Image (spheres, rainbow, N blue to C red):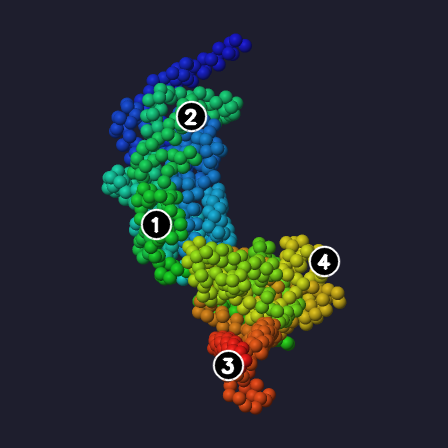
Amino acid sequence: MTKIYLLALVVVYNFCFSAGISMNGVSTIPPVLNIGAVFALSSTIGKVAKVAIEAAVEDVNSNPEILGGTKLKLTVHDTNYSRFLGMVEALTLLENETVAIIGPQFSVTAHLVSHIANEFQVPLLSFAATDPSLSSLQYPFFVRTTQSDLYQMAAIADIVDYFGWRNVIALYVNDDHGRNGIAALGDKLAEKRCRLSHKVPLSPKGSRNQIIDTLLPVSSMMSRIIVLHTYDIWGLEVLNAAKHLRMMESGYVWIVTDWLSSILDTDSQLHSEKMDDIQGVLTLRMYTQSSEEKRKFVTRWRHLTRRNTLDGPIGLNSFGLYAYDTLWLLAHAIGAFFDQGGNISFSEDSKLSELSRGDMRFSSMSIFNGGKMLLDNILQVNMTGVTGPIKFTSDRDLINPAYEVINVIGTGSRRIGYWSNYSGLSVVPPEALYKEPSNRSASSQHLYSAVWPGQTTQKPRGWVFPNNGRHLRIGVPSRVIYPEFVAQGKGTDKFSGYCIDVFTAVIELLPYAVPYKLVPFGDGHNSPKRFDLLRLVSEDVYDAAVGDFAITTERTKMVDFTQPYIESGLVVVARIKKLNSNAWAFLSPFTPKMWCVTGIFFLVVGVVVWILEHRLNDDFRGPPKRQIGTILWFSFSTLFFSHKERTVNSLSRLVLIIWLFVVLILTSSYTASLTSILTVEQLSSPIKDIQSLVASSDPIGYQRGSFAENYLTDELNIDKSRLVPLNTAEEYEKALTDGPKNGGVSAVIDERAYMEVFLSTCCEFSIIGQEFTRIGWGFAFPRDSPLAVDMSIAILELSENGDLQRIHDKWLTRSACSSQGTKQEADRLHLKSFWGLYVLSGVACLLALLIYLIQIVRQFARHYLDLQELEPAGPSSQSSRLQTFISFAGEKEVVIKNLSKKRKLERASTGDIDKDKSTDGDLNGSVNPGNEA
């Protein structure tokens, strides 16, 4: 056993010695490092990459600052487009102690070789494998030194969205490269609310006839936006077959991945027939910044191709630039590897020693011990190459992914813009935008105009009707209610109504012809459920649906609706009772409490002003009776701003100003409220709004087949037993008239558009409250139908030019129950609303006259004798007394009082004279008898 162990030790020692590795794994920096390259040398990318990589090796080896004295030895193996050969050639390279492999070119081969790289810990640097599924998690030793197709597909999705297209057909090679690339495209399109309508795989080894057979169904599809994702080796054959099937004519859009730009850059003298096959095609090219290094390398390229190729000079494509930078990136990483003390050492893979059989030399393939360290240095490289700054992100993608958008025109191509992951589409180079904040808004996206297939500069619509001679089947509900909206002629297949006229007008505005046929849906006896018709549209039984379709959340999950062409919403309709005005309507604006408080404040303000003015103002002084009258008059005269008493106290003026402002507000509010009460028709209904209806237990009517049923049960939680389906307007009227007590309904819930038509002939009903839903009507199409978008644009145009309103007025404007006359009658004021005021005023007048008459009579009786004495003596009669009374009443009261006072004075003086005379007489009498005696 010991002998066997020693023998094995000798074998291992000899192997390690032959490999230049010491037993302790320590070695000096080798003078030569083996690196390998695996790609198809005859391919468009491969023949350019070979020249570029060999030039890079020459430049690195001639620059001692990079690797010191170590030289790179490049071994290139040709895979000849074979996955199997690619794997075998990679294994062959590993027999020669290769520290890194550049390649492979194809993603399919990269998937296989990456497993080998993982096993032997040899970094695999690919400048052309763009499959986004080549993940570092699955393939840790795979390093992509070019842009991932994830970004290329994002650029295509942005282009599709920029031009307003929504459905895309994908033609792709049926392998990992094609499938994974198109999967990424589908995800990016979904982010833009676009979609892949069809995925059409192409056999990697298909003949021309097979290609034509694959393209033939595509030519009859609705979408005209085609993305071609394949290889350069037979991509042109696909485009040639498409032209043969007349798929390169006006109306088509072809967006081709970067393989086409590589062909155009590599073969500048492409045959004219091949150029004819690709006219108007859009393609992408990986963007590389302009720099002095790039300019020098491009200038040097012609000399390199003359020296290194047998077929003469070839053009330089972007993959060649990335291949050149890949070698330099590897050289910088190896230099950092040596600087960190890394050693080039290999060890045997114990798993492979057991597999050595026959001529298979698995034992000669060893694990690169420094592979992980070299890989880390590769990912940490930060340099500037001919492609621009080179640095890896945390996801192992190169920074600043960007593409040029190329349009094939004539004998060459034209750049119409750029795309970058930072700012999207632009007409300026991406590096100019890196200095500004990222802006991906729609307004910031720009491209120059393109020339499309068919030599047209007009943007293709992106879709056409399938060229199969079939008319679009448009489902129309066979309604039995409200023919103003949709009605089918008896015994014919013709329809009329508001919805039909709108649809016809919209179709006429489209810039293309739409062959269609209206197909009735329903039995004609009961209104069909709109939901059932929409479900058939989603199942492609119908191509569209035209009618009174409310746009609801549930329905939009099945179909796409156009822009709403009429606004609607659910409303409550119930029977109403008109409230008649009464004689005391003028008291209605204020409540009794309001009247009392207002009256009290009038008195309070009067008293306050009297208190403040009493000591200063003579207008507020006098006998108590007069002062009370002044207070009352002053208080209530402020209602009309007609008080004449002046105020001298500043405090009373402040109180008065505030109170007058309050009076102004009160009178304005009173006037407005009274005007509303007297001029607006007052209606009453036991149903106040939808909440009161839901809270009750009364039955509720709804239109059979409408969405109202589901809304009432699902959203408002109304028990289904309360709902009564109604088919016709007559049933509506009867159910509302009978009421819940006579087998009818308390209210009907339906859309406003229907109810306005119903109420145009039934004035004893009215809409209660406001709409409690806000919806619109639209035409329905299958999901992602491009026709729905064009129809929406046409509806907006129809609305802007006024035709939509004219169609509405034609079908839905009615003179509702002589509504104009009713309105005028409601606005006129009647005597019955005011006779109470007239009575109050009349009573006040009569009462004042009566009091005045009593006062006059009393005054006349008091002063009649005085007046009679002033008149000349004559016969006294009833007529003369009446004349005297009239004269008395017409005389000024002051004059009468003055005459009365004068008469009293005269009487008083006359009495005094008589008294004096009588006194004198008595005196004389007493003297005479004495004398006689």
Residue at the outermost bottom position: 875
Q: Nearer the viewer, residue 227 or 886?
A: 886
CB atoms of marks 3 and 1 within 8 Å: no
Res. 697 mark: 4
CB atoms of marks 1 and 2 within 8 Å: no
Query: Along the polypeptide, which appears first: circle 3 or circle 1?
Result: 1
Q: Determine the residue positioned at 35% across, 41% down.
A: 319
**Element class at badge 3:** helix
**Element class at badge 2:** helix
Instruction: Please give the residue where the numbered disc 2 appears in the rendered image.
Output: 372
Relative to 589, is 391 above or below?
above
Amino acid carrying mark 4 in the image: Ser
Say which of marks 3 and 1 sits in front. Answer: 3
From the top left corner, tell me how far across and down residue 548 is, in percent. 58, 65
Q: Determine the residue positioned at 31% across, 38% down.
A: 388
Say which of marks 1 and 4 sits in front. Answer: 4
| Quadrant in the picture for the N terminus | top right
From the top left corner, tell me how far across and down residue 624 is, in percent. 53, 61
Q: Residues within 10 Å of mark 1 (few under 14, many from 20)?
A: many
Q: Residues within 10 Å of mark 2 (few under 14, many from 20)?
A: some
Amino acid carrying mark 2 in the image: Lys
Q: Residues within 10 Å of mark 3 (few under 14, many from 20)?
A: few
CB atoms of marks 3 and 2 within 8 Å: no
Amino acid carrying mark 1 in the image: Ser
Q: Quote the CA–CA distance across marks 1 and 2.
A: 40 Å
CB atoms of marks 1 and 4 within 8 Å: no
CB atoms of marks 3 and 4 within 8 Å: no
Relative to 547, is 925 above or below?
below
Instruction: Please give the residue where the numbered disc 1 appears in the rendered image.
Output: 426
Instruction: Please give the residue where the numbered disc 3 appears in the rendered image.
Output: 890
Q: Is residue 234 visible?
A: no
